[in-house]
Image (spheres, grey):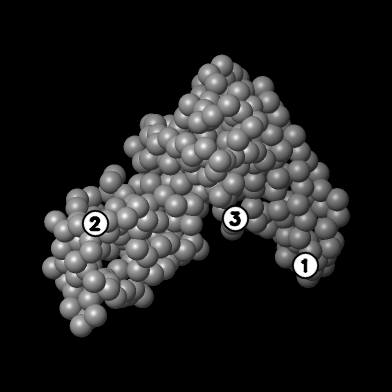
């Protein structure tokens, strides 16, 4: 029996979900003195691996009943399965069970690691499987927290050692990315997701989002992580002069993450940041990161910062620009 490969073009849902399926020990109906179990989450550690490697499958279970008892969880990754019996779980307690499961020899792609409670299909999380890798460089993948496709988005990778180096790579049709090494091994990198140019109108995919603030590369073939790209929110950012008139003619305004990577915007007639491909203003940003709005002056090699923002669908950010004439104009 072979399970189907995971579809990349999902229409919704979260990736490591809270299940609504509950099971009672022994398959009996729940009474005042019997346990009732709920499977809250399943995880894969790591969530990106090569065929024939072992991963750790973990599931969190809560006893919501009124009696102590045990249950079983069956983990499945394509054709490979593993069943684990829990120790007795008291009422109101939550426990995590783990098991090792081997990654099967399958085509490279994204597969579901599924956890079933008492033989009921319950919840799953994606695992990116590589066949044996033989190409030196950085291998990673992305997955959207909202289920949107991230194909053709971009990944910025910069080194943080003394000599600066960077690379920009595309996300392929299996939501993976590959980069040549920036330096010899044993160097540090930071990673940013950039999806802005791929969405002419608004979606929940952020224009920019930091993925990895620090990572040390130590191997010729370095398998990074499966990075979850957070949900983005349309955020309105407006620039005005000292008289509160809209600033409209700056050639380019950037919104940068704390790593230093940025997405670029122009301004509309009301001073709002707008992506050139979009018909309405706004920047799509996640809520849990802080970004700097800035622009480069005509003279000087450092940008002028206007202020900090975060993703927000109901908050407008307005910044005053001193001496707008110092910046290049459209």
Q: What's the CA distance linking mark 3 and mark 1? A: 17 Å
Residue 66's image quarter? Answer: bottom right
Label 2 SS: loop
Dot 3 corresponds to which residue?
19
Expressed as whole percent of the image width and height from the top left, the position of residue 35 reads 78, 61
Element at badge 1? loop
Residue at the spot of label 1 = 92
Label 3: how many residues lie within 10 Å, few (<14), some (14-19) or many (20+)?
some
Frontmost residue, 316 versus 83: 316
Mark 3 or mark 2, whichever is nearer to me: 2
The image quarter in which residue 68 lies? bottom right
Going from N to C along the chain, the mark reached first, 3 or 1, is 3
In the picture, the disc for residue 298 is 2
- Dots 1, 2 in contact, CB < 8 A: no
Location of residue 55 with respect to 60 vertically, above or below: above
Please tell me whether residue 86 is drawn above or below residue 176 in the rendered image: below
Front in this rendered view, residue 146 or 77:
146
**Towards the viewer: 188 or 51:** 188
């Amino acid at each position: 029996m072979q399970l189907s490969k995971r579809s990349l073009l999902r229409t919704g849902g979260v990736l490591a979900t809270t299940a609504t399926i509950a099971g009672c020990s022994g398959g009996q109906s729940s009474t005042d003195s019997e346990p009732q179990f709920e499977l809250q989450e399943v995880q894969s550690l790591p969530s990106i691996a090569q065929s024939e490697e072992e991963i750790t499958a973990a599931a969190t279970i809560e006893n919501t009943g009124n009696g102590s008892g045990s249950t079983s969880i069956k983990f499945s990754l394509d054709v490979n399965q593993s069943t684990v019996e829990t120790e007795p779980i008291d009422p109101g307690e939550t426990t995590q069970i783990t098991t090792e499961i081997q990654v099967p020899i399958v085509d490279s792609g994204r597969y579901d690691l599924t956890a079933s409670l008492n033989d009921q299909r319950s919840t799953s999380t994606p695992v990116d499987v590589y066949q044996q890798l033989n190409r030196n460089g950085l291998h990673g993948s992305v997955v959207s927290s909202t289920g949107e496709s991230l194909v053709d988005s971009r990944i910025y990778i910069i080194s943080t050692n003394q000599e600066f180096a960077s690379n920009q790579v595309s996300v392929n049709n299996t939501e993976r990315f590959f980069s040549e090494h920036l330096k010899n091994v044993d160097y540090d990198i930071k990673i940013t997701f950039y999806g802005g140019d791929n969405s002419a109108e608004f979606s929940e995919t952020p224009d920019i989002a930091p993925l990895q603030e620090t990572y040390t590369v130590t191997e010729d073939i370095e398998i990074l992580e499966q990075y979850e790209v957070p949900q983005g929110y349309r955020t309105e950012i407006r620039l005005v002069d000292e008289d509160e008139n809209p600033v409209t003619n700056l050639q380019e305004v950037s919104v940068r993450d704390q790593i230093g990577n940025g997405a670029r915007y122009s301004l509309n007639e009301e001073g709002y940041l707008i992506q050139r491909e979009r018909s309405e203003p706004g920047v799509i940003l996640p809520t849990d990161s802080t970004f700097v709005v800035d622009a480069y002056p005509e003279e000087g090699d450092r940008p002028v910062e206007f202020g900090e923002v975060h993703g927000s669908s109901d908050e407008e950010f307005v910044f005053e620009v001193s001496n707008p004439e110092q910046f290049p104009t459209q």
